[in-house]
Image: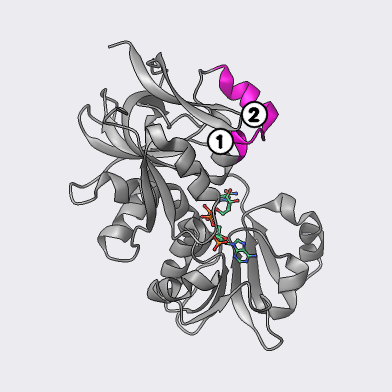
Amino acid sequence: MSGMWALAVDPGRGRCEVVTAPIPRPGRGQILVRVHVSAVNEMDVQVRAGGWKPQVKAFRRAGPVLTGFEFAGVACGDGVRIRAGQRIIGYTHVLKGPRLHAEYACVDEADLLAIPDNLSDENAAALVAMGLTAIEILEHLRPLSRGRSCLVIGAAGGVGAYAVQLAAGQGAEVTAICSSRNTDWVLGLGARHVRAYETGPRFRPDDRFDLVIDGPARSSFAEAAPHLRRGGTYISTNPLADPWGFVRALASTRRAGWLMMLSTDAARLARLVALHQAGGLFPVIDSVHHLADADTAFDRFAARAKQGRVLLRITPAPT
Ligand SMILES: NC(=O)c1ccc[n+]([C@@H]2O[C@H](COP(=O)([O-])OP(=O)(O)OC[C@H]3O[C@@H](n4cnc5c(N)ncnc54)[C@H](OP(=O)(O)O)[C@@H]3O)[C@@H](O)[C@H]2O)c1
């Protein structure tokens, strides 16, 4: 066993290609994992389109795989907590390089967790990165409680769909914004009110929220602040989309936070799985694609009106 299937993206052509590559060798503290299912994220699609050039240059030093942040699969070696043969999930931090759109990868054991048998590969992979992001927002940055109100922008996307579920589970009154095709689906996730972004403004004059979560980072702190209650919080996923928001927020009685770079550890992954097992987080899967159809998966991620996560089944190997 020396070669593996791997996804290589060609930013020049804006296309994906399945190639054979050497199986990586685990470094200190790492475990070789076999990837069953991974997911597509916005950065993957941007890398295929030629974005993130300095980062891509650095990622290339580790091999041809430039995409894939999370996975469900199986451990191929023993670690301190993880044993060979265990079904596991994991996530790689962007600075360590995305590499999970491949049959095998080496992942820090600290970022791995064994999962129960009743959690399928697809459901597990769908939960990892965006479930962790929603937990970061609603359990660490700004937990809500009964009687609080929350606006979720981009409620049918990965971040948004899990944020709606968690906020509703905390007892908050959730208003969701999504495309008109997804309004019923988003109500089914637990939103009390829904607005289609094509047919009206994000904020209405009488809106007052305890928390505004902007998944696709389309709004600004200045736009949201008049609609936040005193002590209310605005959270967006991309600080670069609203650089002045930082400055304005410093002088405001309203609070603001921008997610920088998602990171995780076994405890956070355990919380994610515990929430799922307790019925508090339902995996949202738009579609599952074979590795050989990665371009279709990437195109689907970038398309309008998807519902939750776009997944890539990596093994069994493409035919
Ligand atoms: N900084 C961090 O640590 C961190 C962590 C996780 C994610 N992120 C970032 O968060 C962003 C969202 O990720 P994701 O996986 O949730 O993406 P996604 O699944 O593509 O979701 C984005 C959602 O936004 C909706 N949308 C598009 N335009 C809109 C508008 N004008 N108003 C309201 N909604 C609109 C889309 O709906 P339609 O499809 O119907 O248009 C889609 O459902 C990405 O940029 C990702 O990189 C950052």
**Dots 2 and 1: beta carbons under 8 Å?**
yes
Please state the horizontal and vertical placement of residue 22, each as a whole percent of the image. 40, 13
What residue would you read off at disc 2? 55
* Label 1 CA crowd tier, 10 Å (few <14, some 14–19, many 20+): some
- Give the residue displayed 56% in from the left and 64% down from the top: 154
Which residue is rendered at x = 64% and y = 29% of the image? 55
Numbered mark located on residue 158 in the image: none
Relative image position of residue 263 (x, y in whole percent): 51, 43
Quarter assignment of residue 76: top left
Whether residue 296 is situated above or below residue 126 in the rendered picture? above
Q: Spatial distance from mark 2 to mark 1, Cα to Cα?
A: 9 Å
**x, y percentage for residue 159?**
50, 58
Res. 91 visible in picture: no
* Chief secondary structure of the magenta portion: helix
The residue lying furthest to the bottom in this view is 206
Which residues are drawn in magenta?
46-61
Element type at marker 2? helix
Asked if ligand 1 lies within 8 A of label 1, the reply is no
Q: How many marks do you count on the picture?
A: 2
Q: Which residue is mark 1?
A: 94
